[in-house]
Amino acid sequence: MITPRINLLDFDADQMAAYVAGLNEKPFRAKQLMQWIHQRGVSNINEMSDLAKSFRANLIDKAEIAPLPVIKDELANDGTRKWLLDVGAGNAVESVFIPEDDRGTLCISSQAGCAVNCRFCSTGHQGFSRNLTSGEIIGQLWFAEHLLRNEPGAVRRIETYPTPGWEHTGRVISNVVMMGMGEPLLNYDNVVSALRLMLDDRAYGLSRRRVTVSTSGVVPMIDRLAQDCPVALAVSLHAPNDALRDQLVPLNQKYPLRELLAACERYLPFAPRDFLTFEYCMLDGVNDSDVQAKELVRLLANIKCKINLIPFNPFPESGLKRSPPQRVQAFANILLDSGMVATVRKTRGDDIAAACGQLAGDVIDRTRVRERAVHDNEIIQPITWLNRLDD
């Protein structure tokens, strides 16, 4: 039987060092490999010219750099770019690049589908298949950075104190948000391994302030992240009380607001910025009233935070509508008048279904979400699956 090759994209720095040591090579070879793969974007081991020929031959026999095959590449009118990437067995995930004058942000997926099934999110209505490996997660950044960096019109961001290896070409992607398909903290180990690569100076060298994990509120893993790899944290809140949040974010039934906000307070001392972000999707007639805005002010009064109001991006299965612009602004004004920091997110890439909440990909659904009846306001609550994933 042929032993499958190891995908070197799966290794963070410590794992790469251990792998190289297992091949009886000197430790500096691991650093060289990291730089060839992540900084230079080389996937052909034979092109790694400063590696000994014997080492290259050994690697070719046992390992590979295996990026995700691209199924579709779409460009929106506003410059947002979305890729559909094949992760095998009938599953595909989506990644989105959002160019701006002062940054280039990549939105990365962590799971094929999602078991949390938030009411307003298209991914949850696709169901859940499996967690992505660390190589499949970091592979999205590897692919996008090196593809974009080699394009003539790419905006290269030369920093005052560049990461070694980036001096001449500059990076295209300056920010990463784990806000694509899936709940990152339900794929904790693989996500943290990928995060460490994003932050590592031998790989992408991103600042902790420029890497954001978005979570619907997996309380134990918020606490672990604070200890293991603290990065910027964004919490998908979307409701000012448990009764409504139970309906919009079924995970709230397992980790209600009191527990979630306590975890957020514990995270703050470790956060790379001195605040957390709370995301709030504006749903017409559901969570956007003046009363609910004032309730939100009271709920978050003791947490240093920014509230990001997100215009809902409709899809047919949701049965929901976007709050009118004037209602969103009125809601924002109540928050601002109370002294809170609040912004309204600009919708990007909605003409190619690349905006917040629209990512769906292709998912072989093991939770059978789409086979269950959903009538009017009935919400599917796959808590059994959430319990399994959180073990």
Image (tube, rainbow, N blue to C red):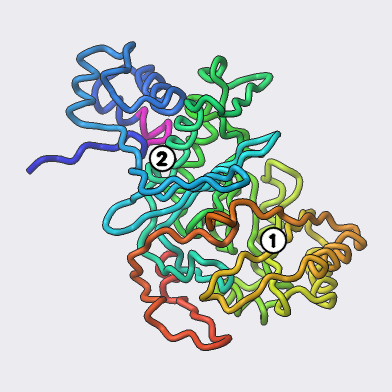
Q: Nearer the viewer, mark 1 or mark 2?
A: 1
Q: Quadrant of the N terminus?
A: top left
Let me know if residue 13 is in the magenta part. Answer: yes
Marks 1 and 2 sit apart, C-alpha to C-alpha, by 28 Å
Residue at 40%, 83% (x, y): give it. 372
Q: Is residue 254 visible?
A: no
Residue at 29%, 25% (x, y): give it. 44
User: Between residues 148 and 201, which one lies in front from this camera angle?
Assistant: 148
Question: How many numbered marks are there?
Answer: 2
According to the image, label 1 marks what residue?
310
What kind of residue is marked 2?
A: Gly
According to the image, label 2 marks what residue?
139
Q: Is residue 166 above or below residue 209?
A: above
Give residue 101's quadrant in the image: top right
Q: Main secondary structure of the magenta part?
A: helix
What kind of residue is marked 1?
A: Ile
Label 2 residue SS: helix
Q: Is residue 220 above or below residue 109?
A: below
Give residue 131's quadrant in the image: bottom left
Give residue 236's quadrant in the image: bottom right
- Please report the bounds of the magenta region as a residue range: 11-17
- Of the residues under marks 1 and 2, which one precedes in the sequence? 2
- Residue count near mark 1 (Cα–Cα under 10 Å), binned few <14, some 14–19, many ≥20: many
Q: Quadrant of the C terminus?
A: bottom left
The residue furthest right is 337
